[in-house]
Amino acid sequence: MNGPCIPWSPAPVSMWATGVDWGVHRHTGAGIHLDGALASIRATVLGDRLIITALIPAHNEAANVGLSIGSLHGQTRPPDRIIVISDNSTDSTVEVARGAGADVMESVGNTARKAGALNQALAGLELSSHDFVLVMDADTQLSPTFIERALVDFRDSTVGAVGAVFDGVQPQGYLQYMQRLEWARYAESIDRTRRTFVLSGTAALIRWQAIGDVHQIFGRYYEERSITEDMRMTMDLKIAGWRLTSPVDCQATTEMMPTVLWLFRQRRRWYLGALQNVTAYGLTSVSMPYWRQQMMLSISVALMTLFLVLTALSVALGWFVLNPFWMAIGVVFAVERVVTIWSAGWRARLTAALVLPELVFALILQSAFVAAFHQHLTRQTGSWHHLEGVSHVRN
């Protein structure tokens, strides 16, 4: 996300390897003093025998997987092993991954998408309880101190996983800029509340002990019946009693959808996965916040529909007038949008103040939610539409 961030100091090789300029973001909010904390981590943790294994599930990601691997080689605390899990790839993903210095495992008979590929890899790992697994998307690049910063939070023995706060590449056009603002607000919310709602699928460093606890409780690692396995793992880890964090300093850059159709498909999958997960869990102390989210989304869709219908009727019947009370409500709404995007710069503030650009974007997302709700009611499992052959990092 392009939200509150800190200045990175990557080595030149890191910037060359990833194609992302990590030095342009700046974190000015509350948080730890990163330089001092990382110095302490270098002195204490990095000398230990802990092993960090990176797993990168990839389906036809030849255009991106090399950059993802490069961002791992460029870490101030690199993983000890990088394994790319080629899942039914028909392009040169395997060759590119090996050429970039990663080990490659090819999934066998997998029909459960990313979750199934990860489960096959996790079942073959032999790690100790104090080791870690980094699960990372093949179209994602990590900031150079991602792993080292995540290890700071693992000083707390109750923390089971540290997730990424993600941003996109330089946005191209209106639609991608709206996604950047959306993600910036999410980063601001995480920074303000210190709560991890979903352990991002873009990248997460997880204790092997925590993964083992999930397997012991549920009899599997990732839930293969969920189309959003990252959210389900988040809930599973919480059920197992682990705390989760997502420091805004742990940045990842990932793909943004280039068209309305691709955005609609992505968000429909996200919403459907959330509905699948909350209904599978039922009403528990862990699932209640997620149930509230679904209720608020439903209310939001209903209110937006009512607003548009009443506005259209009032204009058609000649009843439309500018009411001072509702104008004041609109001003308060606009101020809130500006404040929550303030750190993203003047262009973001101006866009938020105009309201309409983000209102149109919200309509696209709400239409995706309605479609996902229909899929869930009709017991559809959903599908994963994958952008192939497109590099998601631009210099």
Image: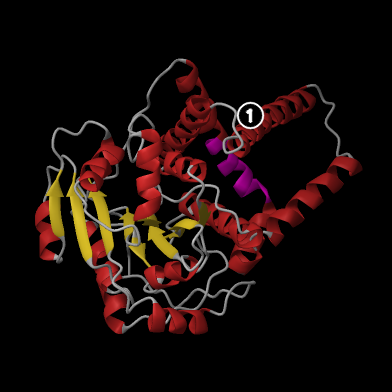
Residue sitting at 27 percent across and 33 percent down? 112
Measuring from the top left, give residue 63's x and y in whole percent: 21, 56
Q: Is residue 214 shown left or right of residue 60?
A: right
Q: Residue at x 65, y 57 (%)?
A: 193
Residue type of the residue flagged with mark 1 = Ser
Residue 314: x %, y % from top left: 79, 26
**Residue 268 sits in quarter:** top left
Q: Is residue 278 left or right of residue 64?
A: right
Q: Residue at x 57, y 74 (%)?
A: 27
Which quadrant holds the C terminus? bottom left
Viewer-nearest residue: 71 or 314: 71
Vertical relation: 309 (above or below) 232: above
| Scheme of image coloration | secondary structure
Where does label 1 land, which residue?
A: 298
Taking 116 as reference, is 44 above or below it?
A: below
Q: Total label count?
A: 1
Vertical position of residue 334 compared to residue 371: above or below = below
Location of residue 346 by image quarter: bottom right
Across and down, in percent, residue 216 comes to 36, 39
Residue extending farthest to the top is 378
Which stretch is magenta? Answer: 355-365
Mark 1: give few (<14), some (14-19) or many (20+) Cα within 10 Å: some
Does the magenta run of residues contain 395? no
Residue 304 sits above or below residue 194 on the image: above
Where does the image place residue 298, in percent across and percent down from the top left? 63, 29
Name the image quarter holding residue 341: bottom right
- The chief SS type of the magenta part is helix
Q: Is residue 227 visible?
A: no
SS at mark 1?
A: helix
Question: Which residue is at the front of the view, 310 or 213?
Answer: 213
Looking at this view, is 280 or 216 the one in front? 216
